[in-house]
Amino acid sequence: MTDKRLVLTTVGSRDEANTIATELVSRRLAACVNIVGPIASVYHWQGDVERSDEFLLMIKTAEYQMTAVQEALRSLHSYKIPELIALIIDSGFESYLDWIGASVRR
């Protein structure tokens, strides 16, 4: 197991995705953010089943920056309840994992 994390969140527009990705990388809270989409999302919200097009952000970071990533997403995200799911990166190419560590501020 490593201290690297893959954080997932969705947003409602490409502009918002680009803003969040740029901020996270510029602040060195993330080594890389992939923006995927648009994707179709189906979810429960306020008693109804909703459908919308969203953009998925795949954020590569390290465990020691998780609090800062959470705070940044809370302040930058337009959703009342933003998605934030953090997955432990169990393994990967050592050189890639080292690059994540070197790119994320300690």
Image: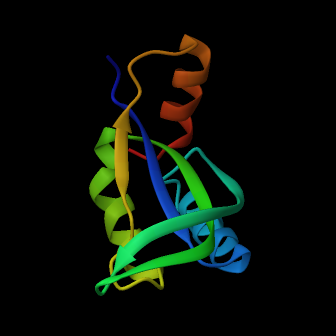
Q: Position of residue 52 (x, y in %)?
A: 59, 76
x and y percentages locating residue 2 in the rendered image: 35, 21
70 or 85, which is in the foreground?
Answer: 85
What residue appears at the point 30 percent right and 43 percent down from the top-left corner? 64
Which of these two is toward me, 105 or 51? 51
Q: Quadrant of the C terminus?
A: top left
Establish if 13 lies above or below 24. below
**Where on the picture, by quarter, is residue 94?**
top right
Q: Is residue 8 rendered to the left or right of residue 80?
A: right
Q: How many tags in the picture?
A: 0
Q: Nearer the viewer, residue 100 or 17?
A: 17
Res 70 quadrant in image: bottom left
- The residue depicted at 55 percent of the width and 75 percent of the height is 51
- For the residue pair 96 and 52, the one nearer the viewer reads as 52
Image quadrant containing the N terminus: top left
Classify residue 104 as left or right of residue 84.
right
Q: Residue at x 35, y 85 (%)?
A: 80
Q: Residue at x 59, y 28 (%)?
A: 99
